[in-house]
């Protein structure tokens, strides 16, 4: 069933990983997909080719979500090109630095916050302005992380950015509910993407990490995409202000043995 037929979806950071899986899944469901990349054009082109196998009406753009002016300019042009954007997926992110807070340069902290948190803010603000001007509903899906709730030493920058996205989403959901705009987070746990490159490269690292997951395995990007399709569809019209954790039970396993 083409449950996203005639919808236009902008998926940031869709050149690889979870973003790529969502872009392809949306295209399979009939959406016109705007594929975004920041630094790797070749991977962006690869995603676009896979999307076009499902839906010919797709486009590739270079977008720096941490740059307010770039977001404003590019999204305005896309709105004109496609006649509107119905679905926004805020997926672009950089990983934690792995640097203890007392050794972390301000520039490192700022880069993570600018991309992960400010990027979500910039794109959401423009999207909401657009949907309110049209007087039409819309869907915002943020790809957050279990680290919006739990912390990891050496990742103060990442943890803070994802925790910020949680309350940003909840606040926006309250503000835009009267306009029929739904806002939700998906919080993945350990997913086999470049964010977990060490686990992908080293079976021992992966095995040790998966021991903490009740379902006994890491997740696949496609599994996150299944939920993203639901949240973008009319089936989720009564869903807003929620975080959907997809972690194989990791969060409920934390603290065992305490």
Image: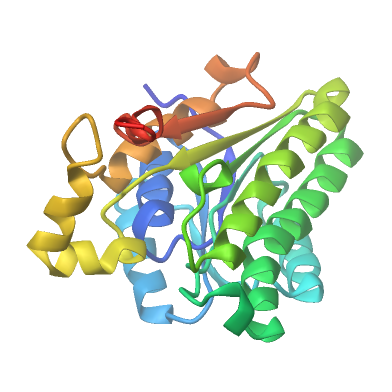
The scheme the figure's colours follow is rainbow
Name the residue rendered at 23%, 44% in the picture.
218
> Which residue sits furthest left?
203
Question: Which of the pair 161/13 is nearer the observer?
Answer: 161
* Residue 5: x %, y % from top left: 50, 31
Which image quarter: residue 47?
Answer: bottom left
Locate residue 77 relative to residue 37 in the image: left or right.
right
Name the residue rendered at 84%, 30% in the picture.
176
* Residue 158: x %, y % from top left: 56, 62
Above or below residue 172? Residue 235 is: above
Locate residue 107 relative to residue 243 in the image: left or right.
right
Above or below residue 112? Residue 166 is: above
Question: Which of the pair 70/161 is nearer the observer?
Answer: 161
Residue 249 appears in the figure: yes
Residue 52 appears in the figure: no
Q: How many numbered badges does the structure rendering display? A: 0
Locate residue 7 relative to residue 208 in the image: left or right.
right
Name the residue rendered at 35%, 49% in the picture.
21
Name the residue rendered at 40%, 33% in the picture.
251
* Residue 96: x %, y % from top left: 50, 68
Q: Quadrant of the N terminus?
A: top left
Q: Quadrant of the C terminus?
A: top left
Which image quarter: residue 110?
Answer: bottom right
Which image quarter: residue 72?
Answer: bottom right
> Which residue sits furthest right?
133
* Residue 206: x %, y % from top left: 16, 56
Locate residue 146 relative to residue 215 in the image: left or right.
right
């Amino acid at each position: 069933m083409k449950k996203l037929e005639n919808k236009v979806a902008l998926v940031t950071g869709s050149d690889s990983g979870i973003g790529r899986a969502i872009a392809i899944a949306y295209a399979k469901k009939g959406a016109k997909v705007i594929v975004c990349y920041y630094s790797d054009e070749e991977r962006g082109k690869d995603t676009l080719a896979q999307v076009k196998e499902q839906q010919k009406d797709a486009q590739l753009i270079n977008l720096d979500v941490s740059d307010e002016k770039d977001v404003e300019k590019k999204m305005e042009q896309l709105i004109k090109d496609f006649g509107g954007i119905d679905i926004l997926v805020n997926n672009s992110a950089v990983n934690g630095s792995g640097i203890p807070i007392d050794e972390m340069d301000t520039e490192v902290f700022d880069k993570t916050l600018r991309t992960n948190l400010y990027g979500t803010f910039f794109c959401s603000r423009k999207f909401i302005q657009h949907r309110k001007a049209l007087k039409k509903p819309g869907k915002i899906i943020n790809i957050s992380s279990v680290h919006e709730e739990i912390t990891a030493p050496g990742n103060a920058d990442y943890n803070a950015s994802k925790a910020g996205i949680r309350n940003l989403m909840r606040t926006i959901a309250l503000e835009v509910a009267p306009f029929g705009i739904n806002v939700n987070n998906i919080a993945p746990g350990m997913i086999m993407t470049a964010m977990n490159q060490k686990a992908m490269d080293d079976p021992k690292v992966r095995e040790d990490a998966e021991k903490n997951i009740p379902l006994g395995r890491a997740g696949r990007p496609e599994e996150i995409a299944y939920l993203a399709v639901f949240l973008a569809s009319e089936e989720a019209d009564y869903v807003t202000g929620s975080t959907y954790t997809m972690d194989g039970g990791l969060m409920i396993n934390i603290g065992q043995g305490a």
